[in-house]
Amino acid sequence: MSAVLAFLPQRHRITTDEYYRMGEAGIFKADDRVELIEGEIFDMSPIGIDHAYVVKRLNSIFMQSVGMKAIVSVQDPIHLNARSEPQPDIALLRYRDDFYRHAHPRPEDIILLVEVSDTTLRYDTEVKLPLYARHDIPEVWILDLEHQRLEVFRRPDEGVYLEMFCPNRDETIAPAGLTECRVDLSNLF
C-alpha cells in the first residue's frame, strides 16, 4: 500500500488558549453561544423559555440555600483541561474568597454540575456526561424537560458514573456534597 493511500486525515483540535485567541480576534460574534469540548467548538442551542425558567428557578433555590458554603455559577465556563471548557447551565463550586477571579473553576472545585436539557438531551448525555465523568466531576444532574424528569449521576470511576437514579417529580433532593441545599422537584416541572 502506498503512503498516499495509508494517510488518514486527522481532526485539528484546538486548545483553550487558541479558543480564547479566536474570540479576541473577533472570529466569534459577541452573542455566539459556543463551547469547547475535547478541542472541538460546538454551537450551543438557543435558550428556550422553559430552559430559562428552570435555570432561574434553580439559581434562586441554590442562592438561598448555599450561603457562604458554595458559589452558584450560571452558564459560565469550567476548565476541565487544555482542550475542554464546557459551559454547564449551573455549577455549584467550592467557596473561594476571590470568586475564581483569575481562572475558571477546575474539576476539583466542582460540587455539582446541572445541565438543563430541552433540545440537547442526547448531547448532554452522550458528549458532556462522559466528559464530566472522565474528569471526576462528583455529581451531575440532567434535567430532562421533555420527559419532566431529573437524572442524577454520582460516583465517577474510570470515565463512567457508577450511580444513576431518577427521583420522583414530587421528591426533594440535595447534592451529595451539599446536603443542606434541598430542591423540591415539584417546583421545577
Image (cartoon, rainbow, N blue to C red):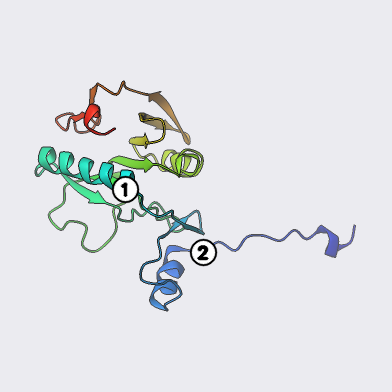
Amino acid carrying label 1: it is Ile
Question: Label 2 near label 1: C-beta < 8 Å?
Answer: no
* Label 1 or label 2, whichever comes before in sequence order: 2
Q: Is residue 46 above or below residue 30?
A: above
Question: Residue at 29% across / 57% down in the picture?
Answer: 104
Give 167 or 84, whichever is nearer the viewer. 167
Locate residue 22: give its quadrant.
bottom left
Quarter containing the C terminus: top left
Locate residue 16: give its quadrant.
bottom left
Left or right relative to 125: residue 169: left
- Disc on res. 14: 2
Give 105 or 142, whichever is nearer the viewer. 142
Helix, strand or loop for disc 1: helix
Helix, strand or loop for disc 2: loop
Amino acid carrying label 2: it is Ile
Instruction: Point out the residue furthest to the right here.
Output: 1
Left or right relative to 29: residue 14: right
Give x and y (percent) for residue 115.
36, 42
Q: What residue is disc 1 on?
A: 49
Question: Residue at 24% across / 64% down in the picture?
Answer: 102
Give 36 or 52, whichever is nearer the viewer. 52
Left or right relative to 161: residue 96: left
Q: Nearer the viewer, mark 1 or mark 2?
A: 1
Locate residue 147: give its quadrant.
top left
Marks 1 and 2 sit apart, C-alpha to C-alpha, by: 33 Å
Quarter containing the N terminus: bottom right
* Residue 91 visible: no
Instruction: Point out the residue furthest to the front here.
Output: 49
